[in-house]
Image (cartoon, helix red, strand yellow):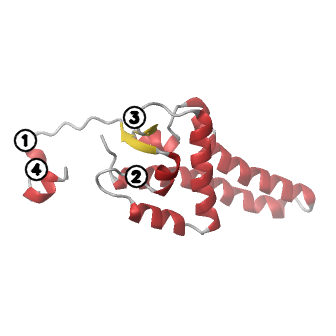
Amino acid sequence: MIPSFEKRVRAFAIDTSGAMILVILAIPMRSTFEGLLGSIITYTMILGGFIGFYFLPYFFSSGQSFGKRVQKIKIVDLNGNDLPLWKVLLRELFKVGLSVITAGIYMVISFFIMSEKTSRTIHDYIFKTKMIDLEVKVRGKDDYFGTSESLRKKGL
C-alpha cells in the first residue's frame, strides 16, 4: 500500500526535529566551553544529531528511520524487497545533503513532484526505491461519514 503524503512529511519532520533539538542544545556549548573545546563539542553534537537521526537507525531497522517507524512506513526497492544498507544510506545522504544545501527547498519541490498514485519523490526515482505503508487500514461503515464519493475513490 502507498503511504500518504502526510505520513511521509511527518516521518521526515520527526527525524528532522530530533536532529534540530541536538543542534539547539549544541549552540550554548560553544559559549560554555571557550575556544577549541567549545567548537569541538558543538560540532560533534551537531554531527551526532544528524548521523543519529538520519543514518544510524538504518543499521538496526531495514528501511526505517525513527520517524518512518513511528509512521509505519518503509523504504523498499521497486519490487517491494528490502534494500541493501549502502543504497538506503546513499539515498538518505542525497536527500539530507540537498535539503541542507538548498535550505529545505529541495524537500518542498520533491514533495510537490510526488504523485498520488506512486508516492515517489525525486530521490526515489534516482535510487529506484519506493515507500510502502506497513499499516493495514480497516474501514468500517462509519468511516465515510461526511466524505464525498470522489474522495472515497481516492481512499480519503
Quadrant of image for the N terminus: top left
Amino acid type, mark 1? Lys
Identify residue for label 3: 79
**Residue at left offset 32%, top offset 44%:** 2
**Residue at left offset 58%, top offset 48%:** 92
Q: Residues within 10 Å of mark 3 (few under 14, many from 20)?
A: few
User: Which residue ends up furthest to the right in the rendered image?
Assistant: 35
Q: Position of residue 8 (x, y in %)?
A: 41, 51
Q: Position of residue 120 (x, y in %)?
A: 40, 52
Residue 59 visible somewhere in the drawing: yes
**Residue at left offset 79%, top offset 58%:** 29
**Of the pair 23 and 133, the residue shown nearer to us:** 133
Are dots 2 and 4 in contact, CB under 8 Å? no
Left or right for 119, reference 65: left
Identify residue for label 1: 141
Of tags 3 and 4, which is closer to the observer? Answer: 3
C-alpha gap between disc 1 and disc 2: 31 Å
Q: Secondary structure at mark 3?
A: loop
Of tags 2 and 4, which is closer to the observer? Answer: 2
Name the mark on residue 144: 4
Q: Residues within 10 Å of mark 4 (few under 14, many from 20)?
A: some
Label located before the other in sequence (1 or 3) = 3
Q: Residues within 10 Å of mark 2 (few under 14, many from 20)?
A: many
Identify residue for label 2: 120
Label located before the other in sequence (1 or 2) = 2
C-alpha gap between disc 1 and disc 3: 33 Å
**Of the pair 153 and 68, the residue shown nearer to us:** 153
Q: Secondary structure at mark 1?
A: helix
